[in-house]
């Protein structure tokens, strides 16, 4: 029995995509129709379903090289067609912000909990379509989520879990085209700050954790707002930059390294000011 996937004509209208990227997205979208019927492909933290489609699988399905598939996945992520989430000791998860289940108008998708031990290789292929919204099936109730809601969800997380100040969040939101872009900027901050902390601890900077902790270093976040704004504007206007993510990351490494040094200098200065020489009368 032959299996077919539906290729949405709107993909052809996006000139930023080549044929490999269009077909890869169609495969991902098609597999999502299977994911929404199986509870093991629901990410509780992100509150949505995801797809697992390994590089090896896509190489076989597209008939192209490994580098081509890697570049295709990278391009789809850059354009907001997919959001990639790496999992420790597991396969990368692909979230599709523009996914819409074709069957929701007739019958809600049922989650088959009996397949919880199956792997992604058992995804069924059905049909594919692209619309503007995100459709999530949670407890068999279809919920449409707009791009604004997705952005707000990321913002709430940055406030609650990352201790980002409003000025920093507003700057990131202002220069982010969508929720995926906002998430990427935040991830760059997290990852570079974490790497800087590891380097500082290896160099015996005892106060490195406090120096890179937003709640204990009030000076850092104000400077970070200006730094991120300048970096984003530079990457958006300088077309000679081929790897904009690497450019921002390299600059953030320097920023956080400098923040550690500045914090230690201020601590040392305060210790000197508080030092009193006893005078015997």
Image: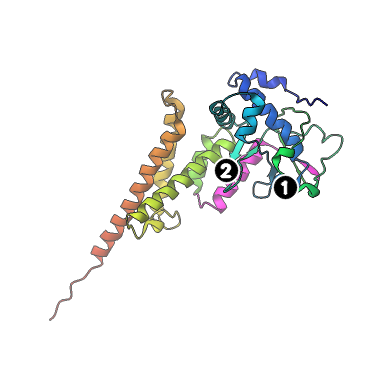
In percent of width and height, residue 258 lies at 33, 47
Residue at 46% across, 34% down: 245
Q: Residue at label 1?
A: 40
Q: Nearer the viewer, residue 121 or 153?
A: 121
In percent of width and height, residue 67 lies at 53, 28
Q: Quadrant of the C terminus?
A: bottom left
Q: Nearer the viewer, residue 203 or 118?
A: 118
Residue 86: mark: 2
Say if residue 277 shows up in the picture. yes
Q: Residues within 10 Å of mark 1 (few under 14, many from 20)?
A: many
Q: Residues within 10 Å of mark 2 (few under 14, many from 20)?
A: few
In percent of width and height, residue 118 lies at 74, 45
Q: Is residue 144 magenta?
A: yes
Q: Is residue 234 magenta?
A: no
Q: Residue reaching furthest left?
A: 281
Q: Quadrant of the N terminus?
A: top right
Q: Nearer the viewer, residue 196 or 259?
A: 196
| Distance between mark 1 and mark 2 Cα atoms | 16 Å
In percent of width and height, residue 189 lies at 47, 44
Q: Residue reaching furthest right?
A: 106
Mark 1 or mark 2, earlier in chain: 1
Q: Is residue 231 left or right of residue 46?
A: left
1 and 2 marks in contact (CB < 8 Å)? no
Residue at 73% across, 49% down: 117
Give the magenta-colored segment's residue range.
Answer: 140-164
* Helix, strand or loop under label 2: loop
């Amino acid at each position: 029995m032959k299996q077919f996937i539906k290729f949405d004509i709107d993909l052809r209208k996006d000139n930023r995509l080549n044929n490999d990227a269009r077909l890869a997205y169609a495969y991902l979208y098609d597999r999502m129709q299977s994911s929404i019927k199986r509870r093991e492909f629901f990410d509780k933290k992100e509150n949505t379903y995801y797809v697992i489609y390994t590089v090896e699988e896509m190489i076989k399905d597209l008939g192209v090289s490994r580098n081509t598939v890697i570049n295709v996945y990278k391009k789809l992520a850059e354009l907001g067609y997919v959001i990639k989430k790496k999992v420790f000791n597991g396969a990368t998860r692909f979230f599709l912000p523009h996914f819409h289940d074709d069957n929701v108008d007739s019958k809600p998708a049922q989650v088959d909990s009996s397949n919880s031990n199956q792997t992604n290789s058992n995804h069924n292929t059905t049909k594919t379509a692209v619309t503007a919204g995100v459709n999530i099936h949670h407890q068999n109730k279809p919920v449409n989520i707009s791009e604004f809601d997705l952005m707000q969800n990321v913002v709430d997380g940055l406030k609650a879990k990352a201790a980002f100040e409003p000025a920093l969040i507003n700057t990131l939101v202002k220069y982010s085209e969508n929720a995926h872009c906002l998430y990427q900027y935040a991830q760059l901050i997290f990852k570079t700050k974490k790497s800087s902390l590891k380097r500082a601890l290896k160099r015996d900077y005892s106060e490195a954790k406090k120096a890179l902790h937003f709640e204990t270093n009030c000076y850092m976040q104000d400077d970070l707002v200006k730094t991120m704004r300048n970096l984003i504007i530079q990457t958006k206007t300088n077309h000679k930059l081929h790897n904009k993510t690497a450019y921002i990351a390299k600059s953030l490494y320097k920023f956080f390294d400098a923040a550690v040094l500045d914090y230690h200098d201020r601590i040392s200065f305060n210790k000197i000011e508080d030092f009193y020489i006893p005078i015997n009368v």
